[in-house]
Each structure stands twice: as C-alpha cells, then as structure tokens.
Image (tube, coloured by chain):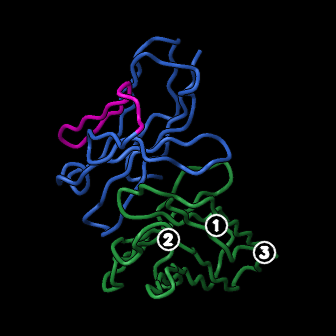
Chain colours: A blue, B green
C-alpha cells in the first residue's frame, strides 16, 4: 500500500478537464515537501511532468498544471487529448520514513 | 544529450545476489544525486534508493534496507545497486533516474527472481 493515495483510474472525454488527486499526510506533503508528477506510457520509462508542485519542465504543454494544499496535491489536465492516455504518478518525501514515496498511480482513459 | 543506461539485470534465485549498473553521459555526473526506482510487472513505481552527488548520504526504502546498497563511481560516471538476499517480490524493472525530481530516466534493466 502506497504512502500517497491516488485514485486507480480517472476518465474524461476529449476537450474536457480532469484532475488526479494525491493524498498524503503530515509527514510528507503536509510537512511542506514538494510534490512531483510523472507520466508513463505502456512499455516506456516515466517522464517528469510537473515538479515542485506546480512547475512544468520545458516541453510540457501548459494544459498540465499542478497544485498543492495541506496534505494533498492535484494534477489537472485541461483540453484532454487522446495522447494524454497514460499512467500518472505523484511523488513526495516522507520525513518519518526518510524516503521518497510514490503514489500508487492513476490510469487516465480518454473516452 | 543526457543518457542513462542500466545493465546487470537477469535471472537469479531467491536468496541470490545481483549488481546493477547505470552508465551516465551527457551531463556532469558529479553535480547530481541519483536514484533507483523499480516497477514490478503490471504494478506502480516504487522508489528504492537515493545517493547524493558526493556519496555522503544514502536513503533506502524500508523494503530493501539492509539488503541493497547504492553506490557510485564519479570518476566513471556510474551508479550501482548491489542487491543481496533477493526475494520474489524484488522482481521488477529497475530504473536509474537523475536527481529528485527525477528529470531523466534510463530504460531499465529487468530483474527476475525465481527458483
């Protein structure tokens, strides 16, 4: 069981907005540690999508955005496109474990 | 161009050992911390270990603590993961990844644990 909790799946129609939540605790997200998001397509390595809560690496479309509040974080995708269909993971640091932790991952389906 | 190339995976019996390597190129290796992250077939990502740029700080997931050792050779731009006392549940694709957040990833090396 992952320290960070994500919904196993979300879905949306093309053009819609979807959000993926990442719920933590006072020892990780709530302790002020940054949240990072990764996108992974089947059979490929993960790709950094959002870093330090709400920053996009070069080349990531501004349709992707991140936010953090309290012990949770969210990834929002607007103008959903078929090519966004992938698995998404959040990551943060847990001070009680002295370890980085990932969420269990969320599979995004574009209807 | 940043490149991370893992090697050393393979089939090993439970209780056995394996040493993974990650060859880094395209960036100043000594400037960056490194991580090992694994993914069991059909499962999510699991962070395994971290080492800072000068190898003075290492962190491990509880699931591997005491069995795995992360190390690096900055002169050879290489990252390693020594895995001992391997268990069935250690079977996974092992990625090396640069820094945290993990901004570059290798393609992974597959570890199979089976008798």
The answer to whether B1 is drawn above or below residue B21 in the figure is above
- Chain of the residue displaying label 1: B
Same-subunit check for callouts 3 and 2: yes
- Between tags 3 and 2, which lies in front? 3
Q: Which residue is mark 3?
A: B11
Q: Secondary structure at mark 2?
A: loop
- Chain of the residue displaying label 2: B
Q: Which residue is mark 2?
A: B63
Give how far across and how far down residue A6 sits, in percent. 42, 39
The answer to whether A79 is drawn above or below residue B100 in the figure is above
Q: Residue at x 41, y 21 (%)?
A: A18
Image mark for residue B89: 1
Q: Residues within 10 Å of mark 2 (few under 14, many from 20)?
A: few
Point out the tag, 3 or 1, that comes first from the N-terminus: 3
Label 2 to label 1: alpha-carbon separation: 9 Å
Label 3 to label 1: alpha-carbon separation: 13 Å
* Quarter containing the C terminus of chain B: bottom right
């Amino acid at each position: 069981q992952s320290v960070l909790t994500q919904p196993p799946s979300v879905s949306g129609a093309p053009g819609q907005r979807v959000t993926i939540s990442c719920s933590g605790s006072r020892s990780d997200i709530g302790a002020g540690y940054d949240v990072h998001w990764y996108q992974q397509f089947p059979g490929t390595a993960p790709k950094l999508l959002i870093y330090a809560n709400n920053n996009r690496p070069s080349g990531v479309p501004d349709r992707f955005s991140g936010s953090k509040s309290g012990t949770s974080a969210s990834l929002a995708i607007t103008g959903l496109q078929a090519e966004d269909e992938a698995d998404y993971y959040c990551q943060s640091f847990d001070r009680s474990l002295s370890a980085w932790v990932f969420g269990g991952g969320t599979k995004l389906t574009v209807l | 161009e940043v490149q991370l190339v893992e090697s050393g995976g393979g089939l090993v019996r439970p209780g056995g050992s394996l040493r993974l390597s990650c060859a880094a190129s395209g960036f100043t290796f000594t400037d960056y911390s490194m991580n090992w992250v694994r993914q069991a077939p059909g499962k999510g990502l699991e962070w395994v270990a971290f080492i800072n740029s000068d190898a003075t700080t290492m962190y491990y997931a509880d699931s591997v603590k005491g069995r795995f050792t992360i190390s690096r050779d900055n002169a050879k731009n290489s990252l390693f993961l020594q895995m001992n006392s391997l268990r069935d549940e250690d079977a996974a694709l092992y990625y090396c990844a640069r820094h945290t957040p993990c901004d570059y990833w290798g393609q992974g090396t597959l570890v199979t644990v089976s008798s």
